[in-house]
Image (tube, grey):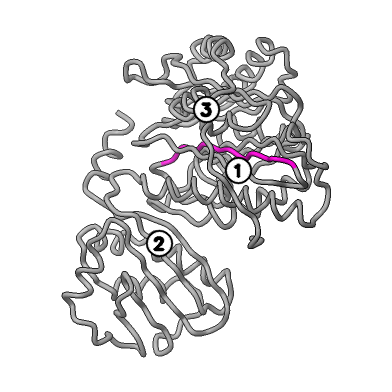
Amino acid sequence: MPRSVKFRKVAGGVAAAKGFSAAGVRCGLKLKKNALDLGLIVSDRPCSVAGVFTTSRAAAAPVGWSRDVVKRGTARAVVANSGNANACTGERGARDAAAMAIAAGQELEIDPDEICVASTGVIGRPLAIDKVVAGVLDAAEELSPDEDGGAAFARAIITTDTVEKTIAVRLIVDGKVVTVGGSCKGSGMICPNMATMLAFVTTDAAISSAMLQAAVRSAADVSFNRITVDGDMSTNDTLLVLANGAAGNKRITRTGRAFEQFAAALEFVCTHLAKMIARDGEGATKFVEIRVRGAASESDAVRIGRAIGNSPLVKCAIHGNDPNWGRIIASAAACGARFEPAKARLSLGGKLAFEKGVAADTPLTELEAAMKPKDVAIELDLRLGKGAATVWTCDLSREYIGINADYHT
């Protein structure tokens, strides 16, 4: 990230950028009374579009539809529902995903092929498409370019999340004020290999679809691809970014200073949202940052970070304020990455716990104290090379079991 890039946080989320409006309404998919469950984002002009999606072989119907939109390179709107994933629903699911785009297209007078769709919720249940279509019509009437529109959209896409997740920043690109705003949802079934469950970013930057796709994939790799709550990938994982060019900067079509500035802002937004997901993990009481350095390669550092973050034993120890460093070393050593115990150093909350293949001399009471804060840092220096990566996760509590035992029924 260029050192001279400066951001200013602003309100509005996905509605913060010029030319974008958003809304969130209730269409009746969620059982909870008055819960918003359908969101809409619309640009007043065509946008370059880019995205990354789940690698699951059971990808949901909306993923297939939106992949096709991204391949064509132009979009104007996004329709997203919560309360039903429209996944594993066969041919009917594909028709319902198309129906969402068609309904929005008719109401907004936009080609349905320029409308992305996304869904999240219970897998395997047919979508109540009549409710969704009615919700699309309601959302179109509620569209707002103000903070309220972005906030309503953020509320409409959440499921087991305890908070809405949104951010927007402004910066100067090519002498013009550019805004990048985003919103996401995710709390459980989080271990993506592309993005997260659902994430949407809008920007008024002028940038080609090819360069936008490059920036999106790079940002996803160091943000959404570095979080884990429970080690499970969703069938619906989607990250979509729309850029409408309303900021008036010279269109970015190649690498260079302008691209670096925009990419830095996009990475900042995506990283902020990704960390919010890890912090809001189902039943979570602690946010955990796992910093791996000195690895033989960056891929080894990521693999080790994910292995530690995915370990139920490590996560339970963190929940109980237990500095059981043996679980961390065991996870790192078993994941297939290069690991030499005699060279490694492990610290918990800044306190040395393991070095030279054995326990460090740090008193147990100090290690226990280091585990008590709500934010816990795990630092592992492998001393094997220059590879480094940071992974974010949370602890594993009894509440996680309760949430997921009752989620379907």
Please give the name of the residue rendered at 30% of the width and 71% of the height, measured from the top-left corner: 327
Quadrant for the C terminus in the image: top left
**First to last magenta residue range:** 176-186
Q: Is residue 234 above or below residue 374?
A: above
Q: Secondary structure at mark 1?
A: strand
**Secondary structure mainly formed by the magenta segment:** strand
Against 160, residue 330 (above or below) is: below
185 displayed left or right of 75: left
Residue 178 located within the stretch drawn in magenta: yes
Image x and y of residue 250, in percent: 83, 42
* Residue at far front of view: 175
Single out the mark in the foreground, 2 or 1.
2
Would you identify the image quadrant in which residue 221 lies? bottom right
Q: Amino acid at mark 2?
A: Glu
Mark 2 or 3: in front is 3
Q: Label 2 belongs to which residue?
A: 289
Q: Amino acid at mark 1?
A: Phe
Q: Does the stretch in magenta take in 84? A: no
Q: Earlier in the sequence, mark 2 or mark 3?
A: 3
Which numbered marker is on residue 135? none
Question: Marks 3/1: CA distance?
Answer: 23 Å
Which amino acid, by three-letter code, is at mark 3?
Answer: Gly
The residue that appears at 57% across and 39% down in the rendered structure is: 238
Q: Mark on residue 150?
A: 3
Residue matched to label 1: 53
Query: Which residue is at the front of the view, 148 or 387?
Result: 148
User: Could you give the CA–CA distance between mark 2 and mark 1, rounded to whole angstroms?
Assistant: 24 Å
Estimate how packed mark 2 is, as few (under 14), some (14 to 19) or many (20 or more) residues with alpha carbons within 10 Å.
Answer: many
